Image (spheres, rainbow, N blue to C red):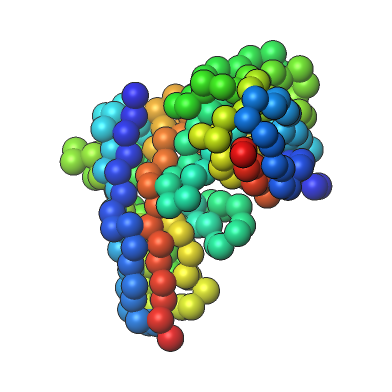
Amino acid sequence: NAGVTQTPKFQVLKTGQSMTLQCAQDMNHEYMSWYRQDPGMGLRLIHYSVGAGITDQGEVPNGYNVSRSTTEDFPLRLLSAAPSQTSVYFCASSYSSGTSGRGEQFFGPGTRLTVL
Amino acid sequence: GENVEQHPSTLSVQEGDSAVIKCTYSDSASNYFPWYKQELGKRPQLIIDIRSNVGEKKDQRIAVTLNKTAKHFSLHITETQPEDSAVYFCAATTTAGNKLTFGGGTRVLVKP
């Protein structure tokens, strides 16, 4: 199993550009999430999904869109990049909820995004 | 929503000593509390977790305690080793959607 994969690893954008961060998992996990991690800070939830066709907002959803057309893929779209979106983005997946006993979240390697 | 606070933000210990990291949460409905370790430049990885029906859990040199009345939980690392140097994050969730709220992290440095 490749686990959770993310592309690209690094990206530089200009203000106003749009792009999609890719995330895929091959563990047949229902739950997938996107986090951003800023220097010296914890991880903040952007959007999450509890299954194909179902998404919901996290703590910091503004400026980002997601969709979940398949169990495997959960792309994150930046609509119009801003310098405040400079961050490291992590995708994560889990088999089920943390309360069920199989909720360990497996993280991807991250995408380091810089917006100029 | 849930708010998780984590202390201290940095912790320096001598090799072989113990390290303790404390977290408090705001939502009394929270019932799942994982701890993640993140080495420099790498992804977070789960090291231990605890559910609300348990007060303490151990796994070799690490242990977690939970006090639901006071709404706080702690990570204990005994006999610290240089490879324990990393950033540690606590988290909490209430929902079946695994909507985790993370603490701000603790940078642990184990000095040989």
Q: Could you say which quadrant of the image residue A51 lies in?
A: top right
Quadrant containing the N terminus of chain B in the rendered view: top left
Q: Residue furthest left?
A: B70
Looking at the rendering, which quadrant does residue B52 occupy? top left
At a point 69% along the width and 36% down the height, the residue shown is: A13
In the image, B95 versus B10, the foreground residue is: B10
Inspect this view and state whether residue A81 appears: yes
Q: Residue A17: percent from the left, percent from the top?
A: 69, 27
At which x and y percent is residue A112?
A: 64, 46
In percent of width and height, residue B24 lies at 26, 43
Which residue sits at x=47%, y=27%? A60
Q: Position of residue B37 (x, y in %)?
A: 50, 57
Quadrant (top left/top right/bottom left/bottom right) for the C terminus of chain B: bottom left
Q: Nearer the viewer, residue A95 or A59?
A: A59
Inspect this view and state whether residue B98 appears: no
Does residue A111 appear left or right of residue A44 in this picture?
A: right
